[in-house]
Amino acid sequence: MSTQTTAPDSTGQTRIAQRRTYLMCRPEYFTVSYTINPWMEPANPTDTELAVRQWQALYDTYISLGHEVHLIDPIEGLPDMVYTANGGFIIDGVAYGAKFRYAERQPEGPAFMEWFAANGFTVADPEAVNEGEGDFLLAGDVILAGTGFRSTDDSHRELERVFGKDVVSLTLTDPRFYHLDTALSVLDPVQGENGVERANIAYLPGAFDEASRRLLEERFPDAIHVSDDDGAVFGLNSSSDGYNVIISPRAKGFERQLRERGYNPVMVDLSELLLGGGGIKCCTLELRR
Ligand code: ARG
């Protein structure tokens, strides 16, 4: 893909689109048949065909932006498998497997690990309960790791051991934002002092406890603070290639904030998948070789 750059924004930074490789899962068996987060209401009907069409629009968007997308086969009876972000966490060809908190999703863990192994990744078998990139986000040289609802503190220590990177633990407190990727989005890497790689991020302050908010404030003083309204429509559950940021069309304020900083927001509506409590980022797992 030709790298797109824009004119530097007011902070003097230039946005650069980087080619990404993702893993997705077509929601052929998508439905809401159990409740493991406040968005899921089995009594509300779901439209699987609409979910597939909306998902396809996200897939097509990635392809048209020049990204590479791999697919894992959906498994009947695992309706949440479409949320591939939870399937693991991968850096430099090493895939730390997921160990799901709730019984309904537990069979997904081995299914994803099998796919990683079959596709040339070194699999690190998880000991601690963790839900992959739903709770772990690579931000420059550090891993931001969520806890409070799904992934445990122990998984943060395991992450540190597997990848040898600093892990910054953040505690989520609002049950609507039960995975880190519903409350925080990594936008692009920034070259900091002494070759340390930092990152630009956006987050919803109200989703975190006091101590985590302070940590975020210290480490990311320039972060975009997203409004409660944009957070509540899963505006932060977005995926960025450094320039193009795929977001929900409902996150109007976030769209404006991104434009002001020189990013290119691209709107994709996954309303049907929101019935399961997931959005754009949830349907996207980054494969870093
Ligand atoms: N129904 C799924 C669950 O509760 C949704 C997962 C959303 N994934 C995410 N990365 N936030 O586990």
Image (cartoon, rainbow, N blue to C red):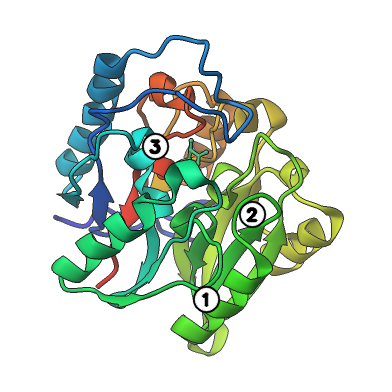
Left or right of 42 on screen, residue 69: left
Q: Which mark's residue is nearer the viewer, 2 or 1?
A: 1
The amino acid on which the numbered mark 3 sits, given as a three-letter code, is Asp
Question: Looking at the figure, which quarter contains the N terminus?
Answer: bottom left
Report crowding for label 2: few under 14, some 14 to 19, many 20 or more residues within 10 A (C-alpha).
some
Residue 59 placement (x, y as % from top left):
22, 37
Q: Which mark is residue 223?
A: 2
Q: Which numbered disc, 1 or 3, marks the residue that appears first in the sequence?
A: 3
Q: Is residue 226 above or below residue 160?
A: above
Residue 192 placement (x, y as % from top left):
54, 78
Q: Which residue is mark 3?
A: 80
- In depth, the one of 273 and 228 nearer the eye is 273
Under 8 Å from ligand 1: the CB of mark 3?
Answer: yes
Q: Which mark's residue is nearer the viewer, 1 or 3?
A: 3
Q: Which numbered disc, 2 or 1, marks the residue that appears first in the sequence?
A: 1
Distance of label 2 from label 1 (alpha carbons): 24 Å
Q: Secondary structure at mark 1?
A: helix
Q: Is residue 34 above or below residue 180?
A: above
Name the residue rendered at 71%, 54% in the picture. Answer: 148
Q: Which residue is mark 1?
A: 159
Under 8 Å from ligand 1: the CB of mark 1?
Answer: no
Name the residue rendered at 47%, 60% in the picture. Answer: 99
Report crowding for label 1: few under 14, some 14 to 19, many 20 or more residues within 10 A (C-alpha).
many
**Residues at badges 3 and 2 in contact (C-beta under 8 Å)?**
no
Q: Is residue 152 above or below residue 258?
A: below
